[in-house]
Amino acid sequence: MTTEQLRPGSGSLPQNRSSHPSPYGGDRLLFLTEALRTFHDTGALAPSGPDLVDALVVSVTSRPNRPISVLEVGAGTGVVTRRLARVLRPGDRLHVVEANPRFAERLRDDPVLAARRPEVGLRLSVCRVEELPEATDGPGPDSQGAPGGTT
């Protein structure tokens, strides 16, 4: 399993909705290719549409004013991930789990995720969710500023 802290880049976040195609024009093609190649693991034939993205992030946008941690399992090409990166607030954390190495590579290179606010922690684990290590009581490798590692 590979787990890493994704470091924010410079610049501001684009204001368009994540339901629009990512800067990678091939997201839909990549998703379809991987869905056909690994359907049992992917479980879908298309990325999430705008209505589903809205429904998935509503609980994040309509919450008390305190930091939260979000676990996204099976991020695919990052349609929901990009939207979450836009709506999360300072102090929030997003842990993305993606088993498909091709999808994970797309997430690593995504400019929207790289441009998120630096006070929002983003961690990517390339594994199946059941392979994540047990949670501990203390801060883990995704704490403020600490890089993730390989476990």
Image: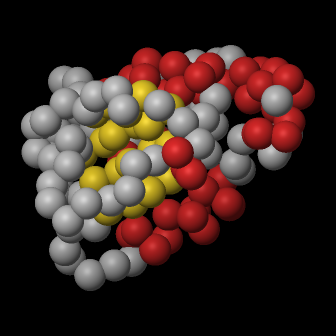
Q: Is residue 120 visible?
A: no
Q: Quick one: 51 or 97, which is closer to the camera?
A: 97
Residue drawn at 15 percent across, 60 percent down: 138
Which picture quadrant has residue 90? bottom left
x, y percentage for residue 57? Answer: 50, 63
**53 in relation to 127, above or below:** below
x, y percentage for residue 72? Answer: 50, 53
Residue drawn at 52 percent across, 19 percent down: 105
x, y percentage for residue 77? Answer: 61, 32
Residue 40 falls left or right of residue 22: right
Q: Quick one: 117 or 123, which is closer to the camera?
A: 123
Residue drawn at 15 percent across, 47 percent down: 143
Residue 52 falls left or right of residue 12: right
x, y percentage for residue 87? Answer: 35, 56
Residue 23 falls left or right of residue 142: right
Residue 63 falls left or right of residue 22: left
Query: Which image quarter holds the C terminus?
Result: top left
Q: Quick one: 19 or 136, which is closer to the camera?
A: 136
Q: Is residue 104 visible?
A: yes
Which picture quadrant has residue 21? top right
Residue drawn at 60 percent across, 56 percent down: 53
Residue extending furthest bottom? 64
